[in-house]
Image: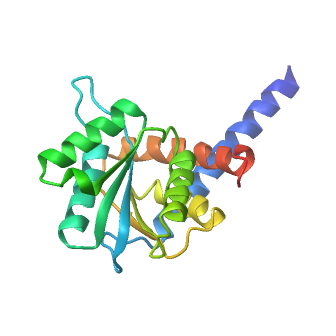
Amino acid sequence: MKFIKVSAILLSVLVVLTVTAYSIFIALLPVSHDSISSHTIGVVFGAGITKSGEPSIALKFRLDKSIDLYRDKKIRMIFVSGLSAEAAVMKNYLLKKGIPATCILPDEKGETTFITVENVRNYIQNYNITDGAAFISQRYHLPRIMFIVRKLKIENSEFIAAEPNRINILEGFLAVFRETFAWLKNIFFDQDL
């Protein structure tokens, strides 16, 4: 019984230290809210859809950032990635905002961040794109995206934060907590890493 209590305490301490270290890492990581270079594609990662079939708040921030980059001529095409329904919702949102259908690349097999980045790498290789990509997500998600992009050797990429200046503290903590363990999964279980 004592062994179980000690193990539970040690595990709890390990979780708190890991989440704290990741939080500090995110806070110190230099990310941009705008693109410095121009890229053929901007990549928008899925972030859920509502029951009414609309993008979640986080997904709207990502899509709106991609629209800004497209209108500023920083990206020429928007790669939207999620499962089939999510990719369709993302595409429809962009169409309603005036993005031409020919400039939207739906990836309906982007089940995870890792798979999305793999799909982007394959697209870049298949179409011989040399200017990398602009990866668009919330700040807490970008370190893991950077890690995967570097491991998969996608050159000339940028990482753009898409979020408001103020974030709900609880939501931010939960996102960092989830992201910490997703990163550990990527490190230890994803084949190409």
Percent of width and height locating residue 36: 34, 80
Observer-nearest residue: 192 or 128? Answer: 128
Q: Residue, x 57% and y 54% (percent of image)?
A: 20
Q: Residue 59 in the image: x percent, y percent?
A: 30, 45
The x, y position of residue 65, in whole percent, is 26, 59
Considering only vertical position in the picture, is 99 above or below 84? below
Q: Residue at x 82, y 25 (%)?
A: 4
Outermost residue, bottom direction? 36
Between 175 and 138, the one lying in front of the other is 138
Instruction: State how the image is colored.
Output: rainbow
Residue in the picture at 34% in, 30% down? 85
Q: Quadrant of residue 139?
A: bottom left
Foreground pick, 178 / 79: 79
- 180 vs 159, left or right, is right
Answer with left or right where residue 141 lies relative to residue 101.
right
Front residue of 115 and 16: 115
Q: Residue at x 21, y 40 (%)?
A: 92
Q: With 158 as the anchor, is 6 left or right in this view?
A: right
Placement of 8 over or under 60, stated as above or below: above
Q: Is residue 56 visible?
A: no
* Farthest residue, direction front: 127
Quarter holding the C terminus is bottom right
Q: How many marks?
A: 0
